[in-house]
Image: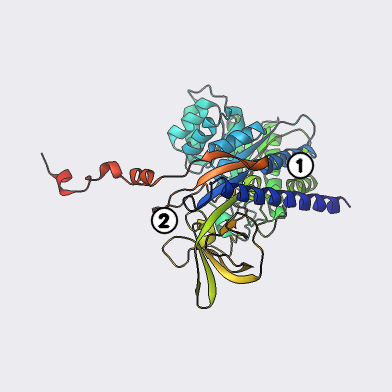
Amino acid sequence: MGAHIEAEEAGGIGARRAARRDEAVRAAVEQGLLGPDSPIVGLLDVVGIRESAAELRAAFEAVLTPGTPVLHAFAVKATPLVPVLRLLREEGVGAEVASPGELALARAAGMPSRMTVLDSPAKTPAELREALDLGVALNADNPQELDRIDSLMRSSTSRSPLGIRVNPQVGGGSIEALSTATATSKFGVALRDEGAREWVVRAYLDRPWLTRLHAHTGSQGVPLALMAQGVAQTYALAEEINRRAGRRQVDTLDIGGGLPVNFASEETTPTYAQYARLLAEEVPGLFDGRYGLVTEFGRSLLAKHGTVVARVEYAKASGGRAVAVTHAGVQVAARTVYAPESWPLRIRAYDAKGRPKEGPVVVQDVAGPACFAGDLLAEGRSMPLLEQGDYAAALDTGAYYFAHHYGYNSLVRPGVYGFGPGGRFAVVRRAQTVEEIVAESGGAQVDALTRAAWEVP
């Protein structure tokens, strides 16, 4: 009965989200955010983002012992936009960063150090020093990095919570490139390699300031059962470290994120509640109050709340198939264009006034503007016929899409707008200009490679 009620609630949430999106597309056309002179935009559903943050908090509160310290840190790489990070901070969500740039974005959003975690497989000494100076949490990826931290800690009074990232080597999911807990993953200390587990235990016993343990198993294509298995292995290691230390040295477990997203429909599945309940069943000691908890969800918080909308510049036919040539392609959806089997997107048709399009279903391709044949958002898709001046919306693109521009053909980055009730919009990121493309491409150094530049005075 509980699962049935939960499914009904999820369906209602999806329907309301779709209605807000339809309203936003129509309003964007009416207000001129979309049109002949602005043929592509990214739209973010502010209400939906807030709802996802609330669902995440509630899911873990339902299984945690009251009073357990918890930090839900958003994986900034999923949507690296300062206003998004500020919104999440307002909702009690911190930031997981993996580069100096992402750390700078989090700081620009006003993210406190106590709500920031730095994970990266290639941290430089300067990056490590900055993290320690700021007091952000830091997970060492490997023995060489831990040696660097050792050197810095000799003269540091940092309050950064410090830990080691381990790879439980429990296997991969359906997308190999996103599977972080395989036998040969580049991340963390591989626990099943000869001598590795003992090295990790000794590292903690020799360093009382190591108080956290981190692993990340999940991502798109990884089933919940495998994610839970990775968390269970990490929990068991923390128990071993504490038993051998004779005290509770590891006091916080960072279980990563990686909840998969359903790109096939409006339904949000799996849910945070399902994952939290599974962890409570498989790793009950995780939630008994002895360990603080850190999560690092990214895609699952934002994907369903973003839409890329592009104008159909031309409608044509080729080989008997209809082709809608739009302004959204590889520059905003590189994963979908280059790996469509792993990253298919739903496409919704809107007419020239931004209204959901109806009519006979036609098999058609939705193409992007880039100059290569494979630049397709969707191939052989059955939907109402897209005509010149209509709009094609790529759904579920709030993470890893319009905020990850690919500079093919020097196509400009689209503007991004947050939308709220009543057709109101807020600028999140302004559209890039052609002049900015020239500047980024060395426009100020136009003569740098000419003969004159190399003549000896």
Is 269 displayed left or right of 338 in the figure?
A: right
Q: Type of residue at label 2?
A: Tyr
The answer to whether 161 is drawn above or below residue 256 in the figure is: above
The answer to whether 363 is drawn above or below residue 29 in the figure is: below
- For the point 71% across and 41% down, which residue is it? 51
Is 19 displayed left or right of 310 in the figure?
A: right
Residue 336 screen position, x and y as percent:
54, 60
Q: Is residue 150 visible?
A: no
The answer to whether 16 is drawn above or below residue 115 in the figure is: below
Q: Verify CB contact (< 8 Å) between mark 1 and mark 2.
A: no
- For the point 19% across and 48% down, which residue is it? 450
- For the point 71% across and 47% down, which residue is it? 232
Q: Nearer the viewer, residue 203 or 389?
A: 389
- Residue found at the very far bottom of the displayed protein: 319
Is 141 displayed left or right of 2 in the figure?
A: left
Q: Type of residue at label 1?
A: Ala
